[in-house]
Image (cartoon, grey):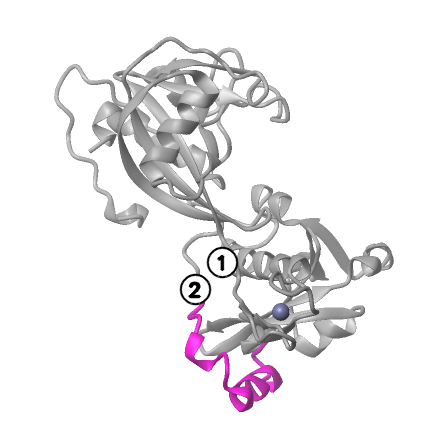
Amino acid sequence: MNDPASIARTPEPPGVPRFDLGPRPRLGYTQSGLARAAERRTDEAFLAASEADAAAGAYAIAGELVILRRQDGRLDPLFAPADARALAPSNETVFLGLAEGAARFGVGIEAGAIEALKERPDLQLVDLRSLAVQGLVVPEHLPPLAEAKAMLHWHARHRFCAVCGAATAPVCAGWKRECPACRAEHFPRTDPVVIMLAIDRERCLLGRQARFIPNTWSCLAGFVEPGETIEEAARREIFEEAGVVCGRVSYFRSQPWPFPMSLMIGCHAEARSTEIIVDRSELEDARWFDRTEAAQMLMRQHPQGLATPPPVAIAHHIIRAFVESGGDVIR
Ligand SMILES: [Zn+2]
C-alpha cells in the first residue's frame, strides 16, 4: 500500500478539484533494504565472520553527527568495520542486519573525538536531518542510518541499570543490555508519537511552532501517553494544541524518526468543531487551509511563500493524501 507505484489514481467525479502533484516522493528513513537477521544476534561466530567479510560495512555516528568519507566527489557513509573503529575511540557496535547478505553495523564514536574528526580533509560530519533533507547520500542509506543512530543513542542513555543502578553491559550484538548485579535485562526503546491532520470537509488544520523555519506549516504532533490508544492520543493532542474536537481517526502510515528515537504514527482525524484556540506554549499559530492552498504549499507554489515540510518528513505525505482524497482519506 505504501509503494508509490502500486497506488493507481481512480478517475474522480466531476466537480471535485484535481491536483497534479507529480510522482509520490520517497518518505525518509523508510523502506529499509536490510534483513535484520535477529536470529543471528547471539551467534558470535557468525558475527565475527560477517565483520571480517570484505563486503561488510559500518556506519560511524558521533552523537547527532554521521561521519562520511569523501570519495571521488561523493559522500559515502559506509566504512569497513575496522576502519570505523579506527577513526577515534568508539563505544558500542550494533549489528544492524544484512544488505544482500553483507553485514551492516553501527559504530558509536565518542563525542570527544568530533572536533578532531572535523579537521580531517577526507571526512565530513553532517547531522542526519541535513543529510536526508539535502539528499547528500543515496536514500537507501537513510533507514540503516536511522536504525544505527536510534540504537546508539539508546546505549548512550542506558549505561546504568534502572532497577539497581549498577553499570550494564551490551549483549546480543547490541540489542540488549544486561545488569551483572541484579540480572535485569534492558531492551531498546522506541517512543510512539502521533502526527495528524484534522480535516473539516475541504479544509485541513496546520500549525507552526516558533522553531520552524519561516513560513513552514505542518501537522500537529505529540507523544502517545501510557494507557492511551493512537486514536485517543491524536484526538487529545489536536484538542490540547488547537481546541478542535475530533471524531473518527484513521491510520495512514508510519515513519522511524531517530531524533532521538521516535516512531511517527501518521493519522487523519475528522474535525467535529471548527473554532481554533491555540495553545501558545506549544504553537506559534494554527489555522485552517483549504485543499488548493495545501496543494500550493506542497508544490512550493503558494503566493505568500507558505510551505509544508519536505518529502523526507511524514507530514508532507499526510497533507498530500488529504489534497489527493479530501475527507475521503478518513475511512
Ligand atoms: Zn540491576
Residue depicted at 83% across the width and 58% down the height? 112
Confirm whether the magenta stretch covers residue 129.
no
- Could you classify mark 2 by the number of other residues whose Cα lies within 10 Å: few (under 14), some (14-19), or many (20 or more)? some
Residue bearing mark 1: 140
Q: Is residue 179 above or below residue 114?
A: below
Position of 164 relative to 182 (above/below): above
Question: Looking at the picture, how far across and down is residue 49, in whole percent?
Answer: 56, 89
Residue 223, percent across and down?
48, 38
The location of residue 179, given as percent across then percent down, is 62, 73
Query: Extreme left residue here?
Result: 13
Which residue position is annotated with label 2?
33
Q: Residues within 10 Å of mark 1 (few under 14, many from 20)?
A: some
Dot 2: element:
loop
Residue 75: image tag? none
* Location of residue 76 by image quarter: bottom right
Name the amino acid, label 2: Gly
